[in-house]
Amino acid sequence: FPDIPSRSTFVKQAANLWAVKQKLQQRLVQLMHADNADIHLIDGFPIDVAVRTRAPRSKVFKGEAGYGYCASKNKHFYGFQGHLLVEARGIPVGFTLTAANIDERDAAYDMMDIIAGLLLGDKGYIRPEFKEDCRGLGIDLQTPLRKNMKDDRPKSFVKLIMRVRRRIETVIGQLAEQFEIERCRCRDRWHMTSRIARKLLAHNMGSYLNISAGKAPIQFESLIAAA
């Protein structure tokens, strides 16, 4: 590489490729036949920008980030919220980023036009209007119900969808622990978009290699062992 630039220039050039990374991600989704799946899972996760006590003085993402609450982690935070859509095997097929104070049901509309069939979410996606909109798009939204809500569905079905839905928690855990997707190490949306696209692409590349080797898509430990 005789003309390799300085580190800062290289990082900017890499960030400029965010659209290419997204195209590669979409192509991998097609190669794994995840783009026409009948079952999808949806969930969100926090991306901290600054410690809440320092947030009022922080100038990073001012006017873009917001204050939010993550029920699964039982924590209040300042930053963004990533909204992830995966198919039943755990392969990411859609993603959108919003300020932390945007309702996850409202964010889900950004990804609903690419799916059909069964959509599994947690209790945070309960809203009659949202379920009706899903039905109009050919999407059957299923979530566990709150304690004060009557559930006429068979208990075996409810247990099944709750067990299947945990797969997206596994995927988010992988993205957080192995790819640090919940950590914000940039100062603008341009670099953040590139970083997230790179992490999702890396995750799907691992899934693609696993499938090519005849292994379960998101069992990355076996992939490393095989290498």
Image (cartoon, rainbow, N blue to C red):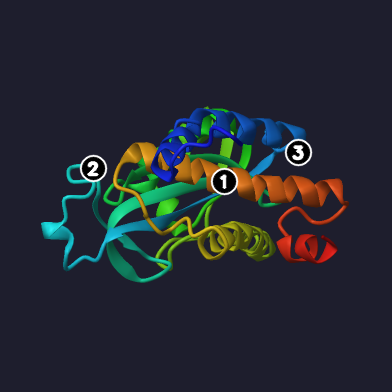
Snapshot quadrant of residue 139? top right
Snapshot quadrant of residue 115? top right
Kindly report which numbered mark, 1 or 3, lies closer to the viewer in this rendering. Answer: 1
Question: How far is the residue under mark 2 from the one under mark 3?
Answer: 35 Å
Q: Is residue 36 shown to the viewer in this render?
A: no
Which amino acid lies under the numbered mark 2 shown in the image of this protein? Glu
Q: Is residue 182 above or below residue 22?
A: below
Instruction: Say whether residue 160 is left or right of residue 104.
Output: right
Badge 3: how crowded within 10 Å, few (<14), some, or many (20+)?
some
Instruction: Say whether residue 119 is left or right of residue 96.
Output: right
Which disc number belongs to residue 64? 2
Q: Is residue 212 shown to the viewer in this render?
A: yes
* Outermost residue to the bottom: 74
* Outermost residue to the left: 57
Q: Residue at x 58, y 34 (%)?
A: 2
Q: Label 1 belongs to which residue?
A: 200
Q: Position of residue 30 (x, y in %)?
A: 71, 31
